[in-house]
Image (tube, helix red, strand yellow):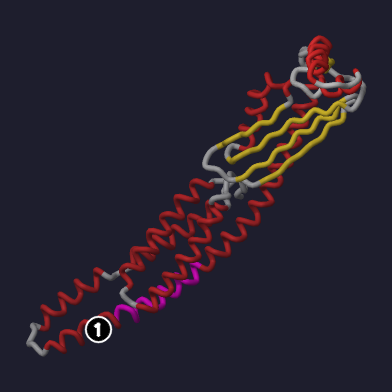
Amino acid sequence: MIQSMTGFGKHVVQLPSKKITVELKSLNSKNLDINARISQSYREKELELRKMIANILVRGKVDFGLYIEITGEETTAEVNQVVVKQYMQQLSKIADGDDLKLLEMALRMPDTMKTEKGDIDETEYASIKEAMKQALTKIVAFRNEEGEVLEKDFIERLKNLKVLLDGVNTMDPERLNTVRERLEKAVADLKVELDANRFEQELIYYLEKYDITEEKVRLTNHLNYFESTLQSKDSNGKKLGFIAQEIGREINTIGSKANYAPMQQLVVQMKDELEKIKEQMLNVL
């Protein structure tokens, strides 16, 4: 089955004095591109958390957020009293006001709060990793659901292409007869004597240049290969993209050889169906 690169996963863990939220969002991308927003206290664990994401999501533009909210009495921030007093002294020289007003103004200035960085609590970090696993499970489930929608659309497009290819097969004998009649009429209009055998040989040679048997066979094989790849165990977005290119190459060749308006109309419809497949292919992992 195929998997989409579009997904969302979120998990919240409530500890006695903190609420931990892990959030993952992903969109399509040629490679894995992780944009991380992590609480400062866990910056040293960023590489490990990125590796957890890379092992599961493989590809896509991923926004990862780790948010720590203090819900109890615990805090690691303190007022930097020395800095605040210096601000208040400086402000008192340029503005009138009581101490309370000056304090309010000073606390808005930079570096008035200081944070003591302590060692990472391993129990808390274990909760974060578990939250990450849960968020990854949810985003994978989301991607799988989106992949099912894409797969249904691909199967419908493949079915349409096969119907159009059947139309090409049905029309091909009529096309060759029409081309033959057109050439015979053109020669007849010249009103010149021709060697019948030589003319027939040249005609056969000319018609062989417009023969699309190989292209029809290869196109059938590519369509079947695309469909079987959809059913493979792993999502193969890049492989499907290569097969789609080969499908396009055969359709283009049929169009260039057709030399017959009704068949070229079918080719245009085939190109339209293939273009819709290629647009959706951008979202496949």
Specify the segment rendered in magenta: 161-177
Q: Residue at horizontal 15%, vertical 75%? A: 201
Provide residue 71's location: percent of width, then percent of height: 89, 28
Q: Residues within 10 Å of mark 1 (few under 14, many from 20)?
A: few
Q: Residue at horizontal 75%, vertical 17%? A: 111
> Which residue position holds label 1?
182
Provide residue 264's location: percent of width, then percent of height: 38, 73
Residue 138 belongs to magenta span: no
Q: Residue at horizontal 39%, vertical 75%? A: 263
- Residue 214 vs residue 284, the one in the foreground: 284
Mark 1 lies on a secondary structure that is helix
Horizontal arrangement in the rendering, residue 17 relative to residue 259 (left or right): right
Provide residue 184's location: percent of width, then percent of height: 20, 85
Residue 70, can we see it? Answer: yes
* 254 vs 224: above or below: below
Magenta span main SS: helix
* 15 vs 270: above or below: above
